[in-house]
Amino acid sequence: MTVTAEALTQQLARAGQFALTVTVDFAAAHRLMGYEGNCARLHGHNWKVIIEVTGARLNGVGMVLDFKAIKAAAREAAKTLDHYYLNDIPPFDTLNPTAEHIAVWFFVELGRVLDTEHARVSAVTIWENDTSAVTYRAG
């Protein structure tokens, strides 16, 4: 069975959404203030950041947004935190550098660069190790 261009065009005319994901990583240390446990002490992670951008409309090339643009913005944001002590970097010098706060920081930072009329950052997932992650989604 072959899917025709007409069938694809008809499907695109429906109210569907595309979700694009890009992954970047960075290494950084932090400590959690007011936390009772090991994470109150200085420690580090090899963080993994998964960015999701959604949109319903394709450009003339047939993309919601070029993966290169998402990767470039995500790498630039990660570079701000890479190999630093997060507690020294605003806003984490006054806001506890939890995975939740880091996810929101990436969401806002990337939204400023990537959000358009037709595409927007819809979720950011922060993995602080192989078994623990948090996702912040657009409301």
Image (cartoon, grey):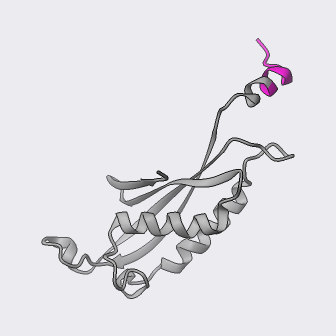
Q: Measured from the top left, where is residue 80 in percent x and y?
A: 53, 79
Q: Residue at x 65, y 33 (%)?
A: 16
Q: Is residue 3 visible to the viewer in this orientation of the structure? A: yes
**Segment tinted magenta in the rendering:** 1-9
Split into 4 quadrants, where in the image is the N terminus? top right
- Residue placed most toward the observer, 56 or 88: 56
Q: Residue at x 66, y 62 (%)?
A: 114
Residue 17, quarter of the rendered image: top right
Q: Is residue 8 magenta?
A: yes
Q: Measured from the top left, where is residue 85 in percent x and y?
A: 38, 84
Q: Is residue 136 above or below residue 93?
A: above
Q: Is residue 91 above or below residue 116?
A: below
Q: Which residue is situated farthest in the left direction here?
A: 36
- Left or right of 129? Residue 110 is right
Q: Is residue 75 above or below residue 21?
A: below
- Left or right of 15? Residue 126 is left
Q: Which residue is situated farthest in the top direction here?
A: 1
Q: Residue at x 74, y 43 (%)?
A: 57
- Residue placed most toward the observer, 77 or 104: 104
Residue 129, quarter of the rendered image: bottom left
Q: Is residue 9 above or below residue 46?
A: above
Q: Is residue 16 magenta?
A: no
Q: Is residue 25 visible to the viewer in this orientation of the structure? A: no
Q: Measured from the top left, where is residue 121 in percent x and y?
A: 58, 56
Q: Measured from the top left, where is residue 110 in percent x and y?
A: 58, 66
Q: Residue at x 43, y 84 (%)?
A: 90
